[in-house]
Amino acid sequence: MKNYILGKFISRVSTPIPHREGLGVGLLLLFFTFHFSLFTFTSCSEPESSLVEFYEDNKLNTPNDTVYSVLGIINKMQKLADRTVILGEIRGDLTEITENASNDLQQLANFTADADNAYNEVADYYAVIQNCNFFLSRVDTMLSKRGEKVFAREYAAVKAFRAWTYLQLAIHYGSVPFVTQPILTEKEGDVSLYPKYDILQIADYFINDLAPYVDTKTPEWGNMNSLPSARFFIPVRVLLGDLCLWSGRYQEAAKYYHDYFTVLNNTHPLGITRAQWADYEFTATTSNFSSAFSRGNDETISYIPMETSEYDGIISLLPDVFNSTEDNNYFFQVTSSGALKQLSRVQHYTLVYSDPSTQMIDTISPPDTLIYENENLRGDLRLYSILTQRASGTINTNYSSIRQTNNKFPTSRNSNSNSVTHQTILPTVTTYRLAPIYLRYAEALNRAGFPESAFAVLKWGLNYVTLERGYISSAEQARAGGLIQFSQYSFTRENTSGIHSRGCGDADADTTYIIPSLPTRNDSILYVENLLIDEMALEEAFEGFRFADLQRIALHRNDPAFLADKIARRSGTLNAALYQKLIDKKNWYLPLE
């Protein structure tokens, strides 16, 4: 049989009509009280005529059809969940693999992964796309009830799933076959029939595709096994911001992000989450920073729900990669990189406090003579609050003597030992979190020519007080206009802080944290962009965003050396061979086959 590449991509693709495996027993049974089987086809084992007939005879025109179909797409998204984090972090500069890492992880870290790598399964992306294409081509978009389109929300949600999936493909594969109609026959699986789109082409296509649905609300299905189903869906307005950011349409990107934060009756102030020193003698710390990664926290915007056990379906194995668990004999595979530790430790921590004897307000920083019980306490405190390592005290060589906990991948602790397991936690893998959206908003503002406004997101937080006190010049405020306007009632100093304060104390009082006087605005933009890429590292480490952040900045600067140097120095020193490899952009991408 002739080898059709796209046919191979979709060899495990299932049509979502009616999509009956859903999210597995764990989630779907508790919502619908019954469980269905999945209709599956392959390009070689199904007669083409029966597949075409199935397509022609099935139109999505009942709520049950659309709900099952969308759940089926989410089921396909589960296969991309862990991979999105792994590809984004292991190929970045903020993590290092341990000697216990799998060969697949080692290949990713060294940029030597081939088609057999376990994380290089391009068919899984096209499975989501095929299901989305099928849904979009068959859903009854004209059906109305009381003047409203019945399936408008599901239609917009599926378009967002498809756009997000193509964006991930382009980030990790470069130019990819671009298909927007369901593939129903072997002939249609011929890859030569389809153009290859790179990330700019994909971004521009989906900006136009999604823009009409920017105000469409997400489906409302209530809770599924304690998970609010509204968070299963990617916010279209934020995704449009991302697409515009990749496309270099910076002012449009900033507007999409801003409008998402400020939408009437559903505003999204950043909050005042932080890890900080609890006293002015720097003897104890306190933190609510890790709460930002809880699925119930308002900062979690959207996620992919996973199952609680392999019996029910696809579980997340990220806890086994980043933590010591019973399943991995406590041998974690990935830890923080030397570069991340160095970056965290050179940050300047500032504390505003009231002197207990004089009641005078003072601003201080940890003294140079301070002895730290843990070097991750030096500088920014976010890494310390997220990643901990402890000696186990065991002498059994079958188990690791060092136990690592990464709070960005919640685990449950076994009450009978100091071991951890992920089996009793209903896991999710986050696709969008609020703070990274604010950082992309700042990136867009900066590139649009508003570096003072972008810097304000880091130091003070953009709110009414920041503007009133003139932290942004009147000239820039006038030029930025509505892009930086925030309600004095919804965005206050009590609910909006600068992101840098999340780990560096009272950054708004830090006289060293400034934009220095530079010759040109372009110099200021470059300076602020460097601050932003560092802040992204401090805030987003381990979440799967890093490789994309580095790639996007390198592409916008037309400077492959930017990405190459960052990643080649992940250990803290330069890996010259890796640097030379990554100077060539074609080595940034995984092989399609």
Image (cartoon, rainbow, N blue to C red):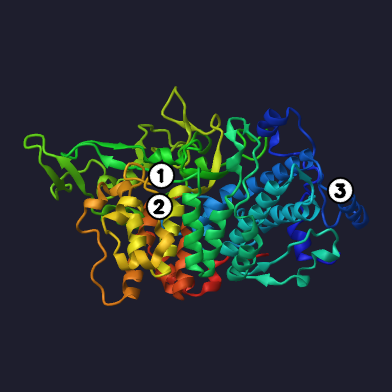
State the mark number for residue 490: 1
The residue wearing badge 2 is 486
Question: In the image, is residue 163 above or below residue 68?
Answer: below
Q: Which quarter of the figure has residue 197?
A: bottom right
The crowding category of the residue bearing disc 3, from other C-alpha atoms within 10 Å (few below 14, some 14 to 19, many at least 20), is few
**In terms of sequence position, does the residue under pointer 1 or pointer 3 come before the other?**
3
The reply to whether residue 209 is visible in this rendering is: yes
Which residue has dot 3 on it?
58
Give 273 or 22, whichever is nearer the viewer: 273
* Cα gap from disc 2 to disc 1, whole angstroms: 8 Å
- Dot 1 falls on a residue whose secondary structure is loop
User: Dividing the image into 4 quarters, which one contains the N terminus?
Assistant: bottom right
Mark toward the viewer: 2 or 3: 2
Q: Is residue 352 left or right of residue 239?
A: left
Which corner quadrant holds the C terminus? bottom right
x, y (%) of residue 13? 76, 52
Which callout, 2 or 3, points at the residue further toward the start of the chain?
3
- CB of mark 2 within 8 Å of CB of mark 1? yes
Q: Residue furthest top?
A: 416
Relative to the observer, which residue lies in front, 509 or 198?
509
Q: Nearer the viewer, residue 124 or 416?
A: 124
